[in-house]
Image (spheres, helix red, strand yellow):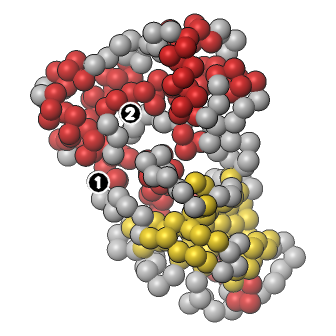
Amino acid sequence: MEYVERMMEAVRYIEKRLGQKTNVDEIAGHIGYSKFHFQRLFHQVTNHTVGQYVAARKLTEAAKTLRRTNYRIIDVSYMYGFESHETFTRAFKARFGVLPNEWRGSGRIPPNLMMDVLKAEYLDHIQQLEAEAAGQVDLDEKIVRGYSARSCSIEHIHDCWNRLWKNCRNKQKDKFGIVRYDDSMEFDAAYTYLAAAEAEHIEAEEEQEQFTIPEGTYIVFEHRGSVEKLPLTYRYIYGTWFTRNTHRLNGVFDFEYYGERFAGVHRSESGILIYVPVSAP
């Protein structure tokens, strides 16, 4: 898709100049578009304005540099093109909710506020997404049981699902993929995965794990297509949707619901619902 290719060229241009002042005219001219056309197209393709993306990338890389080096804060601010220590501190606090020195010490930043470099695969995928959440629901408490993967490798997650499938009393019953995040909130959000069914629908084994999905309010998203692209949908949910809406994350887990819309792991028409717990905006 030509538009995605042009946007990726713009992203590469931005990345090379994170430490410099870059304006929209310059980026647009580099990829051969008018300023007006580029601004609208960038927003339509990426779901971010040019300014939002550039600022978020500068602050994300600055945050990583602060945590991983001993550079002075003022030097990091200049490194990423901020005019002064004060300007950098205000922008950092506004995006991440902590001051640069607090973050460098023992502060925490929710991973969804970190802006990774946009990739062509992600841009291709979000062109096919329903951009808005499927809805908001209130759920009752539900007890599930299954097999967990402490390592997040695809092979281990597949093994959990295979074991669950073999021990389900009724294979037509709904299944759940519980994603529990490490509360450390570092750059690479660690998580454990639990492939589960409602407790009464699975033969109990000693090595199984039980989890209670708490009652509460959830935002529901629908992933369409192969399960291989689920990580891209999660990136959209946490990297774009929640940064543009007022709902607050409530809890360190979310879950995938494999119900009647699920047609198979590789089917393009397959639907998986993703439930994210929230508190009132």
**Residue at x 27%, y 29% (from the top left corner):** 9
Q: In the image shown, does 42 or 5 lie closer to the viewer?
A: 42
- Name the residue tied to disc 2: 52
The total number of labels drawn is 2
**Residue at x 31%, y 49% (from the top left corner):** 124
**Helix, strand or loop for disc 2:** helix
The quadrant where residue 40 appears: top left
What whole-number distance in Å separates the C-alpha atoms at marks 1 and 2? 19 Å
Furthest-front residue in this view? 281
Q: Is residue 102 left or right of residue 43?
A: right
What kind of residue is marked 1?
Gln
Q: Is residue 274 above or below residue 125?
A: below
Query: Residue 159 at x, y = what percent?
Result: 66, 67
**Residue at x 49%, y 52% (from the top left corner):** 246
Q: Is residue 94 left or right of residue 195?
A: left
- Name the residue tied to disc 1: 127
Q: Are marks 1 and 2 in contact (CB under 8 Å)?
A: no
What kind of residue is marked 2?
Gln
Query: Residue 192 at x, y = what percent?
Result: 70, 57
**Helix, strand or loop for disc 1:** loop
Q: Is residue 63 above or below residue 192?
A: above
**Residue at x 32%, y 43% (from the top left corner):** 46
